[in-house]
Amino acid sequence: MFNNLRAALLVPDIRKRVLFVFGSFALFVFMIHVQIPNVNEAAWQRVLQSGSFYNLLGFLSGGALQKLSVIAMGITPFINASIIMQLMTVVLPQLEEMAKKGGEEGRKRISQYTRWLTIVLAATQATFMSMSMRGAGVFYDRSIWFLLFAITAMVGGTMFLMWLGEQISDKGIGNGVSLIIFIGIVLRYPQYVSQTVASTSKGGESLLNLAIYVLIAIGIIISIVFLYQGQRRIPVQQARRVVGRKMFAGRSTYIPLRLNNAGVISIIFAISILLLPQQALTWFSHGATAGPIGAVANWLNAYFSPNSFLYNTVYFVLVVVFTFFYSAIVINTKDIADNLKKSGSFIPGIRPGQPTVDYINRVLMRITTAAAIYLGILAVLPGALQQSLSITTFYLASTSLLIVVGVALDTITQIEARLAMRDYRGFIKR
């Protein structure tokens, strides 16, 4: 891996792309410090401590939410819009037809719909957040004009990050949106390390517990690498073909089914369902403890906190359910069977058509079950570790670990692919 990275920096085209990515990271860090004016810092810190939803957004935005900058919402609305469009492509036949048979023009139209949906989601989220901040006294200027200014600024910041992600995808290496989330997460770790070191030196954290915590974290990262790299290869035999007067012998290949087809989406779905209702109650109640909204909010805070057994049980079940749901959407076994039949290929011992679909479904069910249980355990394990080992200064979220490891592996794979393409071209020239 390190040899490939060193070789990539020696190639002018790849080096230019890598430098563009780091330049985009620098621009992202600069935008974190472009704050919205007229903010009461003390009141804003109190609001941040009142909801776990804000902590999640702040972690994914690289601390932009804590500073209440123009990119405080991060790239989350675009991610939600992309997920919704992917689900709608499966549900609506028109979008499915556009995605499959529309070619490049169809993909451009779906991308345009995703951008418009991003604006709608970003405006909705920014409106609720700004109204909640206004009610909590975060803004010194409580006029309707400043409220509209704050909403516009946050929506503009999200659209800027969406544009920056597209530029990284075109002129850099890797998926631009994923890399923006990646750098947003990585930027928080130096602060956690410094807080942990300071707390350990003052006797706040047990050195033994911290060492155990770090070792378990390394083990989790290694297991995530195996999860991302894991495949179930279904053997495929291609039938003999006659082209003109020549007969081509059949060859053996395989269908690679990834172990984790849902990626981090299942955990994001689950945590959104868990946190959004509680945060919505906070937005509408404005800290009130009376009335039905206040009663529900108090019950959630008392019995459904992130460290409670009920919360973690529901969290685990939701992750498992969404892993099966998203895997069923991503992998279309009927299309796989049809493509095999059209190309004259077959799975040894399995008849083409519906028997092939049933066989692939059985294999997919087995590997998805293993992945779903693993992701469910991974979702609740970091919180349980922090509570049992009394580690309070280092936040290790399963979502962030999956994103960081997955984006890093994907970027390295793309660098290796560009290096292989360069070597192939050089071989052709010789």
Image (cartoon, rainbow, N blue to C red):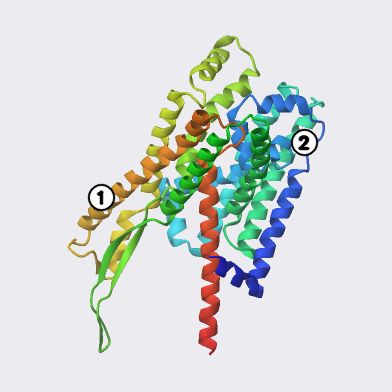
Residue situated furthest top in the rendering: 290
* Residue corresponding to mark 1: 362
Q: Quadrant of residue 372?
A: top left
Query: Which residue is at 70% across, 24% downward?
Result: 46
Residue 424 is situated, as x and y percent measured from the top left of the image, at 51, 80
Left or right of residue 367, residue 49 in this image: right
* Alpha carbon distance from label 1 to label 2: 54 Å
Q: Secondary structure at mark 2?
A: helix
Where residue 363 appears, as percent x and y from the top left, is: 27, 52
Work out whether 422 lies above or below 22: below
Count neighbours of disc 2 (C-alpha within 10 A) and say few if under 14, some if 14 to 19, many if 20 or more: some
Q: Is 61 above or below relative to 14?
A: above
Q: Is residue 18 left or right of residue 227?
A: right
Q: At 60% across and 9% down in the image, what residue appears? A: 290
Badge 1 or badge 2: first in the primary sequence:
2
Question: What's the amino acid at mark 2?
Answer: Phe
- The amino acid at mark 1 is Arg
Residue at mark 2: 149
